Image: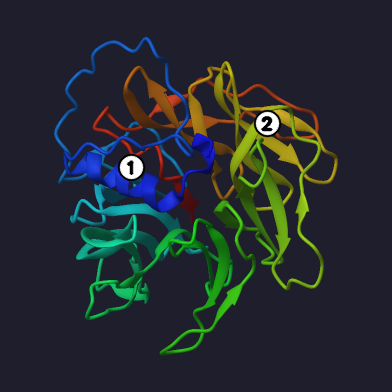
Amino acid sequence: MSPRRLRARELIFGAVAVVLLAVYGALGARFLPALSATMAAPTPAPSKPVEPVAVSLALPGRIAFVLRGDVYVLAGGAYRPATADGRSIQPALSGDGGSLVFARVETLGGKRIVDGQLVSAELGFTRIVRKPTAGGAEELLVEGLRARAQNGLHLVSWYLAPSLSPDGKQLALTEDDGNGASDLEVIDLSMPGRRPVTIFSDGQQLADPAWSPDGRTIAVTTYNTDTAGIILWPADRKTEPQRLRKLPEGDAYRPSFSADGRWLVYTLRRPEGNDVHAFELATGRDIALTTDGRSWGGVLSPDGRWLAYLRADRSTIDLWAMELGGALAPAGGVPKEPRKLTRGEGVDGDSRPAWAD
């Protein structure tokens, strides 16, 4: 199996294990960009922030990102932790910015069958959690421990990359239940108790779902072919999903929509590195928003004027922002100089940022 088709649950467990100082060799082959093989010895990261950290830019709305296993929210000129467990990843925000949704990695002692033998194993899974962005009680939305078994063969799933629909009533995510696939599902959040689940795919390798602003389309990364690409999936499932065919050559992944629905922002991986691109859905026009070969995971601000993204400097990943300067306007423009928002504390490169009002 090629590295980019490794199961998402193994990679995410690896990312969190690094946070917990347990080395897990499979980290990043599928999702993380390839960083330079000639990186110098890493500089020790600054302490993990526990108090608000001021930024010099006046940015609109709220940006959620992950730093060393916890979700942080940047708002009002500073970023501050929204979780404190060291196991939280892949945040999403509601359209109004009032709710934060994320995955939390859990482990459980159990059993696995290896070479026909029942052996002890540490089983990993995730829960999907929602809480107010400003702080407050958490609500469990999706339980990854699906069933306990007396023989230790517990049923567990890795639910990843949660994405809220614009009206907040549906949650798109991917599930890997250990069968070798990562499938797209949509959960109805409008009903209390046991929430209905709609299965969109069966046995596929999908990741990174993102809703269009009108709620009609879910963009998702597909790893079902040798070249990663982006599929547009009708949310009502009345027509067949379509793969975007006009993208530049390379692996396209981690899509997100502009607030007006005109643009799909994504990461393009090529031998020379990773950069953030924007694809105009109506015309097929493609614009490289970064060209340094070290940037990925881009999301646009609600007003469309700014791009937030992840960028690597040697072994350190930070959150950056760039004013687009009309680059996506019909007449075109030149983006302004990007600015680093975090301070080398160790941003998680496997968790796409989220930006909302």
Tell me: 9 left or right of 221: left
Quadrant in the rendering for residue 116: bottom left
Residue for badge 2: 326
Comes first in the chain, label 1 or label 2: 1
Helix or strand or loop: what does disc 1 sit on?
Answer: loop
The type of residue carrying mark 2 is Gly
Quadrant in the rendering for residue 217: bottom right
Residue shown at 27% from the left, 61% from the top: 123
Tell me: 208 left or right of 218: left
Residue for badge 1: 77
Label 1 crowd (10 A; few <14 / some 14-19 / many >=20): some
Q: Is residue 311 above or below residue 307?
A: above
Q: Which residue lies most toward the front here? A: 116
Q: Are marks 1 and 2 in contact (CB under 8 Å)?
A: no
Instruction: Residue 198: give x, y in percent of width and height.
Output: 60, 76
Visible in this render: residue 75? Answer: no
Label 2 crowd (10 A; few <14 / some 14-19 / many >=20): some
Instruction: Residue 289: give x, y in percent of width and height.
Output: 62, 27
Visible in this render: residue 336? Answer: yes
Residue shown at 51% from the left, 20% from the top: 337
Quadrant in the rendering for residue 188: bottom right
Q: Is residue 94 above or below residue 347?
A: below
User: 287 or 57: which is nearer to us?
Assistant: 287
Instruction: Residue 124: give x, y in percent of width and height.
Output: 29, 59
Tell me: 149 left or right of 12: left
Helix or strand or loop: what does disc 2 sit on?
Answer: loop
The type of residue carrying mark 1 is Gly
Q: Is residue 243 above or below residue 246?
A: below
Q: Which mark is residue 347?
A: none
Residue shown at 69% from the left, 68% from the top: 235
